[in-house]
Image (cartoon, rainbow, N blue to C red):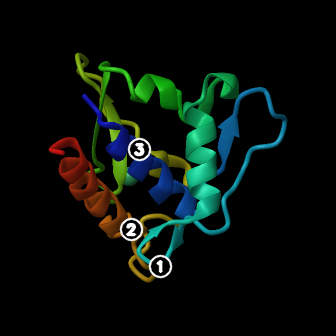
Amino acid sequence: MASPQQVKEYLACWLQLGKPIRVGLQQEPRQVERVIQGDQYSPEFEALWRYIRSPESGDCYLEGMDPTIAELLSDRWEILECARCQMPTYLPSAGIASPLCPCHDLGNWPNNELPQPRAPVDSAGRLWSIHERLTSSL
Ligand SMILES: [Zn+2]
């Protein structure tokens, strides 16, 4: 089962490659110019992620990909690494379907000359969990 963190990373990595995301009933696919800022996700990306997870966003999915983000967050999907491009992709938990990586329709990927998209160093998340541990023991 995919954790929200994995799904977020999947989204972040593909947005960094310029893959647009379809958000609910909005006509135009969205792109996020800056996904990573320093060692964390950018405020734009965090805002988009919060919106995607809110009930009013409707169906959101990476352009051309089948499962919605909400479906990926259910227990029916796993996030794993694509054998071809080492980017996060998805696989049905209970299926034998071959994974269809978002790289299948990106003509310029994999590309060894471009830096591999990444997830930020999660120092804020680590600090937060320390903070929560400390406050919950009071
Ligand atoms: Zn791939």
Q: Which residue is mark 3?
A: 101
Q: Nearer the viewer, residue 130 or 65?
A: 130
Q: Is residue 106 above or below residue 66?
A: below
Q: Quadrant of the N terminus?
A: top left
Label 1 amino acid? Gly
Q: Residue 38, labelled with which disc?
A: 1
Residue at 38% over, 63% down: 119
Q: Nearer the viewer, mark 3 or mark 2?
A: 2
Indicate which disc, 3 or 2, sits on the residue closer to the N terminus.
3
Residue at 32% over, 64% down: 122
Look at the numbered disc 3 and say if its residue's Cβ is closer than 8 Å to ligand 1.
Answer: yes
Residue at 15% over, 44% down: 137
| Visible residue check, residue 75 | yes
x then y, percent, for residue 94 = 23, 16
Q: Nearer the viewer, mark 1 or mark 3?
A: 1
Marks 1 and 2: in contact by CB < 8 Å? yes
Indicate which disc, 1 or 3, sits on the residue closer to the N terminus.
1
x then y, percent, for residue 32 = 66, 59
Q: Nearer the viewer, residue 80 or 24?
A: 24
Marks 2 and 3: in contact by CB < 8 Å? no
Judge left or right: residue 105 versus residue 95: right
Q: Secondary structure at mark 1?
A: loop
Residue count near mark 1 (Cα–Cα under 10 Å), binned few <14, some 14–19, many ≥20: few
